[in-house]
Amino acid sequence: MIIESVDIRPFCNSDMCDFKEMFCTYFRNDFNIEITDSKAEALCSKIAESSLSEIVPLDLILVCGKPVGFISYQIDHPDSDWCEREGWGFLREIYINRSMRGKGLGAKLVTYAEKVLYNKGAEHIYLTSDEAGEFWSFCGYKKTGKVSTINHDPIYEK
């Protein structure tokens, strides 16, 4: 299925309700982690603050004007809350609404974030994931055989 109207843009404050809904679905359904609404609100506010201050970009993908996914990423720096590989680009989180998966939207988000990271000077990009290996391979990432010292998930590199 080809989707005609797809846009990727930075998060803005008016996106908070949509972002919180996607974030809760991401935690509750994809990770099977129960998260209270108040905890979700606090985490989403922290993520939004980091994005709006340009520490950790958060971009939304919209289909026909409706947000259906997000990606957060950064260049690792000792002052950030995550720095496993200083100077490397890091894909922190990616989410696509289940009904929209398999349509190329996740790959579009990854390509978009990679372009931003390379333009900001990253020469290499990595991520951690304990699932979706086929997706990451499709996007050009290779499993390194190493495990993150921070979240203990396998590390993929490009």
Image (cartoon, grey):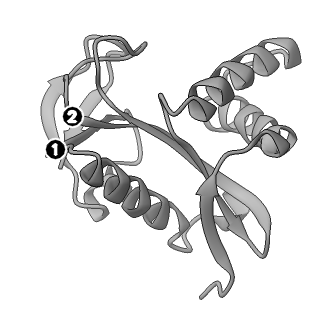
Q: Give how far across and how far down residue 49 sits, in percent.
A: 65, 24
Q: Is residue 92 left or right of residue 53?
A: left
- The answer to whether residue 78 is above or below residue 52 is above
Q: Nearer the viewer, residue 28 or 57?
A: 57
Q: Give the amino acid at mark 2.
A: Trp
The span from disc 2 to disc 1 (Cα, nearest Å) is 5 Å
Q: Residue at x 12, y 31 (%)?
A: 145
Residue 107 is marked as none
Q: Which residue is mark 2?
A: 88
Q: Is residue 11 left or right of residue 87?
A: right
N-term mark: 2 or 1: 2
Name which quarter of the figure residue 147 lies in.
top left
Q: Give the amino acid at mark 1.
A: His
Q: Is residue 100 left or right of residue 90?
A: right
Instruction: Answer whether residue 134 is visible to the viewer in this image.
Output: no
Q: Is residue 133 left or right of residue 35?
A: left
Q: Nearer the viewer, residue 25 or 49?
A: 49
Q: Which residue is mark 1?
A: 124
Q: Residue at x 25, y 11 (%)?
A: 149
- Residue count near mark 1 (Cα–Cα under 10 Å), binned few <14, some 14–19, many ≥20: some
Q: Residue at x 19, y 30 (%)?
A: 87
Instruction: Answer whether residue 27 is visible to the viewer in this image.
Output: yes
- The answer to whether residue 23 is above or below residue 80 is below
